[in-house]
Image: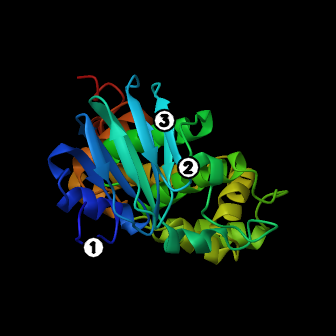
Amino acid sequence: MTTQQYNSFAQWFHGGPFSPYVRMMKSPGGCLSLIETALPAVEMSDPAVPELVLHQDLLGGFNVQADLGSGRFNATTRPDDLFLAAPDFANTITVDREHFVRSIAFPVRQWAHFCDDSFKNPFSFDFGVLHRGAFRSSHIRAAQRQLWRLCDEEGAPSRLLAQAAGCVILAELFRLNGAPLIAVRGGLAPWAERRCLEMMRARLSEDISLDELAAEAQLSPFHFARMFKQSIGVPPRAYLTQLRIEKACELLEHANMSITEIAQEVGYSSNQVLARVFLKHRHMSPSDYRRAVREGPDAAAS
């Protein structure tokens, strides 16, 4: 059992005894941490950290004995089983074989303000029965899969991506625990929609966050994300990607800028990231698109 103090789950895995087993770690904007580990059979005690930590077992088939904040339990896992560790609790875990886990850590203080006006009753990050064993959720699984996939495509995930995925996951956890969010009706007010879209267009090159957009609309991030989708038809992150691709197309057609310069102008960290996103949405590389629009449609195929 360690005597060193750790401020976060990511810090524990980065500097603690299990750091050799970390395969990947990302912390976009500090709003959540993504950690992928491949661990052997192990008996461990994680330190108390001020974060809610959601673990996803990718392989299944191991036996786990643990106390994650609400009493000790035994379970034999299946692929995509979820486990939820309570914040500020030094949990204990024993696993009888190697296992491959993806974890998402939510700093409680940062996420508390996301929930300010989203519940009829005072909320807490104590999820009761969800801390006492394995559970499953297709909504959480889909949100996690998209989050990790987009991280692979875009490199360091944006705050908007991380916060939007976090809202989906937390909303489902609250629902499973019997405290669903207040229902919202209708989309954004016209003035709020206009101001948010103007902000997104003006700050294409920046790592804009969901809470900044929500503040512009004078809503909580949870309400804003759902109302934005009702108004625009897609989530904020997807709409921002559309704007970035449209701007990239405009620059490829008219500006004498390198692909790297265009990538940075529209908010991507490198020409390789722009190329991956561009190929997905336009089915050709930025260079081929530039050739096609400047020299004719046959140029890209030559």
Q: How far is mark 1 from mark 3, CA to CA?
A: 28 Å
x then y, percent, for residue 3: 23, 70
Q: Looking at the picture, does residue 199 appear above or below residue 223?
A: below
Mark 2 and mark 3 residues within 8 Å of each other at the beta carbon: no
Residue type (three-letter) at the residue carrying disc 3:
Asn
Q: Earlier in the sequence, mark 2 or mark 1?
A: 1
> Mark 1 against mark 3, which lies toward the viewer?
3
Q: Nearer the viewer, mark 2 or mark 3?
A: 3
Q: Secondary structure at mark 3?
A: strand
193 shown above or below 56: below
**171 displayed left or right of 58:** right
Q: Nearer the viewer, residue 163 or 296?
A: 163
Of the residues shown, which amino acid type is indicated by label 1? Answer: Gln
Would you name the residue on which mark 2 appears?
131
Which quadrant: the N terminus? Answer: bottom left
Residue 88 horizontal side relative to residue 253, left or right: right
**Dot 1 alpha-carbon crowd within 10 angstroms: few under 14, some 14 to 19, many 20 or more:** few
The answer to whether any part of residue 287 appears in the image is no
Residue hosting label 1 = 5
Is tag 1's residue or tag 3's residue first in the polypeptide sequence?
A: 1
| 12 sits left or right of 74 in the view | left
Give the Cα separation between the discs numbered 2 and 1.
Answer: 23 Å
Does 138 sit above or below residue 204? above
Asked whether the residues under the numbered discs 2 and 1 touch, taking CB atoms below 8 Å apart as contact, a structural biologist would say: no
Q: Nearer the viewer, residue 180 or 228?
A: 180
4, 12: nearer the viewer: 4
Name the residue: 32% across, 56% down.
268
Residue 278: percent from the left, percent from the top? 37, 41
Q: Which residue is mark 3?
A: 74
- Type of amino acid at the residue the image marks with label 2: His
Measuring 52% from the left and 51% from the top, which residue is drawn there?
165
